[in-house]
Image (spheres, rainbow, N blue to C red):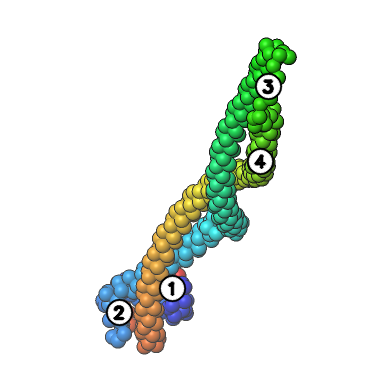
Amino acid sequence: MSCESCLPALSCRTSCSSRPCIPNSCHGCTLPGACNIPANVGNCNWFCEGSFNGNEKETMQFLNDRLASYLEKVRQLERENAELEARIQERNQQQDPLVCPAYQSYFATIEQLQQKILCAKSENARLAVQIDNAKLASDDFRTKYQTEQSLRQLVESDINSLRRILDELTLCKSDLEAQVESLREELLCLKKNHEEEVNTLRCQLGDRLNVEVDAAPTVDLNRVLNETRCQYEALVETNRREVEEWFTTQTEELNKQVVSSSEQLQSCQAEIIELRRTVNALEIELQAQHNLRNSLENTLTESEARYSSQLSQVQCMITNVESQLGEIRADLERQNQEYQVLLDIRSRLECEINTYRSLLENEDCNLPCNPCATTNASGSSCGPCGGCQKRCC
């Protein structure tokens, strides 16, 4: 907005041509477009009404200076606003990829790792349950093994006692056989002695004496001994058969028990071996799962540390950008306040300019047609109108 548009445009040439001269005390007006109006006509006696004094000239000059400085400041503020907007757009374009990075891939990776961790935890829980079940089963088998071992020890103690009884019976049998042999030898000795005595007596008596003696019939010792021997042999044979049968039955029962116990022991040993293999495999798998969990926890810790560092960097960047935006916002608010103040000043200046324009128009209407006709004849005339026209122009 130029000052020429604020003040009325008056024709300087027509006014100067109609007026031949201006007094020396008159000076050209500094306001453009109003050069035909003298700024100080206090010493002239031409105008009695609507003349301006020196204060009004200074006021108009001050208003012109303020208007020019205001317009220059408005243009400067517009340029600064344009520069600030360009800088803000450049900074936003430069920092858009940094302020809003794409975290979707990282979020997907974090979700996958969380799913893997949950699967590993469930697998660890399942393995822990299996290990507990295997421990309980191994405890049961250990209890069964201890029970069977105690039964085996009892059976072995019974077998040892039966073996001792068998040894005693064998000794008793050998003693009885020795007694039978001794009795047989004694019987043979008695028979031999009897025959010798009989033969001796026969030789001594010969045929001289035939004595008949009524005596009780003699006892057949051989028959008695044979009967005794048969009875003892029958008794020994009966005892031997009974002992052999009892020993055979006990041995068969013990063998059956030993076989069943050995089969159970073998099955228990096979189950224990299988359980040991299962426990070893489960321990290996558990160790592998522990290693996998530790590696996943380390990976998760590293990822959290990396993402936390990146997040801290992004937060620092966001804080810096927010501080910069706050400074820019404060600067914009300050400039907006200054702009509002300048707008208020502009509105007041426009009101004052309109007021002075109306005053100037009213004064222009009240001016006489030929103000230079009343000049003194003593030569106190102004210079040629060319000078006035030059000053006005």
The amino acid beneath tag 1 is Cys
Q: Look at discs 2 and 1 and give the one toward the viewer.
A: 1
| Upstream in sequence: badge 1 or badge 3 | 1
Contact between marks 4 and 3 (CB within 8 A): the answer is no
Q: What is the quadrant of residue 58 in the picture?
A: bottom left
The local secondary structure at tag 1 comes to: helix
Residue 211 - label: 3
Residue type pointed to by label 3: Val
Q: Nearer the viewer, mark 4 or mark 1?
A: 4
Q: Which residue is mark 2?
A: 52
Residue identified by numbered label 4: 242
Number of the front mark, 3 or 2:
3
Q: Position of residue 292 (x, y in %)?
A: 58, 46
Residue mark closest to the camera, 4 vs 3: 3
The answer for how far apart the CA atoms under marks 1 and 3 are is 208 Å
Q: Residues within 10 Å of mark 2 (few under 14, many from 20)?
A: some
Kind of residue sitting beneath label 4: Glu
- Which one is closest to the eye, mark 1 or mark 3? 3
| Residue underneath mark 1 | 3
Numbered disc 2: secondary structure: loop
Can you say whether 313 is above or below 376 in the image? above
Q: CA distance from mark 4 to mark 3?
A: 54 Å
Q: Secondary structure at mark 3?
A: loop
Label 3: few (<14), some (14–19) or many (≥20) C-alpha neighbours in 10 Å: few
Q: Position of residue 87 (x, y in %)?
A: 50, 58
Q: Residue furthest top?
A: 204
The structure residue drawn at horizontal position 64% and vertical position 26%, both measured from the top left corner, is 180
